[in-house]
Image: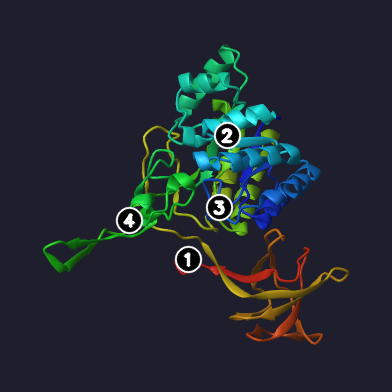
Amino acid sequence: MKNIELLAPAGDWSCLKTAIKNGADAVYFGIKHMNMRDKAGNFEISELPVVMRCLHECGRKGYLTLNTIFYNHELEKLSGVVSAAKDAGVDAVICWDMAVLNLAKKAGIPVHLSTQAGVSNYEAFSFYSKLGVSRIILARECSLSDISDISRRAEEDGIDCEIEAFIHGAMCVSISGRCFLSEATFGMSGNRGRCLQPCRRLYRITDVEDDDNEYILGHNYILSPKDLCSIEFLPELIDAGITSFKIEGRIRPPEYVKNTVSCYRKALDAIVAGDYTPELAAGLKEELEKTYNRGFSEGFYRGSVKDWISDGPGSKEKKEYCGDVVNYYKKIGVAEFIIRAGTLKPGDKILIYGKTTPADYCIVEEIQIEHEAVDSVGKGQSCGIKIPFVVRPGDKLFRITASKED
């Protein structure tokens, strides 16, 4: 268990700091326009030294995702990025294009083979390990049995290559993301990190002979799979030989990172302590349901996929934008807010995060205007609220409520 790593997504600075604060051992992040999550905030090349310094000072690792395909005209830029990654102390590069692998090896940077490579059997695992890959992120289509077999045979053959696998987040209707639907429909290639996810939409069938005849395809989003959730069988994943547990979600908001990382951290710590129980796992799963998801599935881990199709996005809680932080008085732990939408009152659950501020929640105990307690505050008003964590001017304030379905 000492080698088990909890790996979190960091689509921007807020998510990166949220992951650190909530117990991630490592984060993976991308450079703008050079990774499979082009719609994430991502980072500039010039930010690499600051990112890695932030992570290393907190005892965390950082992996740079260069996991898209690259063309001839991009090789010079790619070489510069790899060189910058080396200088910044990036702990590993995640890739599947052999050009990236070759450049990273020359630079002496460890290489983690992306799930985009589709490694789902021992022969492929052995082949890539001999190329110098130090970790392989297995295809999402692998079952527990597949992973166990790969892990066992690698140990028998003395192959020193780690296994990483996804434990939570979005699943793709295609094989490891090799899909051309977005490219064909919108000219935005999923294989270049620009997928507009047309598979996630609800479609209407129209009678070609009569435009007035239209049919909604039931309540299911037939091309959109549920999200993977493994919180209830983590011990089996450990037994299978996985050493890095990866959470998907570099285009999801900071509160998703906070919730998923904190829940899986609690579960992994409980396994180490011998306190992991089905009851604990069920409770953590309920917590995971509070933030954005498409319903949960065990993915391919049990073999063939069952109960696959999502009913659409949802969560047990929703956030409503209320306003912004104007100032924060650290000595007394009070933030000044300007309310720009809705109302806020004592007892409300709130969420705050910003460009460099990690996501965190608290309950409003008291609201003051001009040092006088008030029952509520609304649009256009300024107020003071005691906050048990550090916030910064410009941070966003959200009110958290139960979803209508609940």
Q: Which residue is mark 2?
A: 100
From the top left corner, tell me how far across and down residue 363 is, in percent: 69, 69
Q: Nearer the viewer, mark 2 or mark 1?
A: 2
Tag 3, which secondary structure?
helix
Mark drawn on residue 220 = 4
Numbered disc 2: secondary structure:
helix
Image spot of residue 265 (x, y percent): 66, 44
For image coordinates 59% across by 51% down, the residue present is 32
Q: Most extreme residue toward the top, as rendered?
A: 157
Q: Is residue 243 visible?
A: no
Q: Earlier in the sequence, mark 2 or mark 3?
A: 2
Question: Circle 4 — which element?
Answer: loop
From the image, tell me which residue sits under label 3: 288
- Relative to residue 348, is residue 135 depicted above or below? above
Identify which amino acid the numbered label 3 is placed on.
Leu
* Residues at marks 1 and 3, CA–CA distance in whole angstroms: 15 Å
Q: CA distance from mark 3 to mark 4?
A: 21 Å
Q: Nearer the viewer, residue 276 or 337?
A: 337
Number of the front mark, 2 or 3: 2
Tell us which disc is closer to us: 1 or 3.
3
- The three-letter amino acid code for the residue at tag 4 is Asn
Q: Measured along the vertical axis of the image, is residue 57 above or below residue 254?
A: above
Image marks 1 and 3: residues in contact by CB distance under 8 Å: no
Residue bearing the label numbered 1: 406
Nearer to the camera, 397 or 68: 68
Mark 4 or mark 1, whichever is nearer to me = 4
Residue 380 visible (yes or no): yes
Residue 297: horizontal and vertical position, in percent? 44, 45
Task: Answer with left or right where residue 160 lies relative to residue 248.
Answer: right
Q: CA distance from mark 4 to mark 1?
A: 20 Å
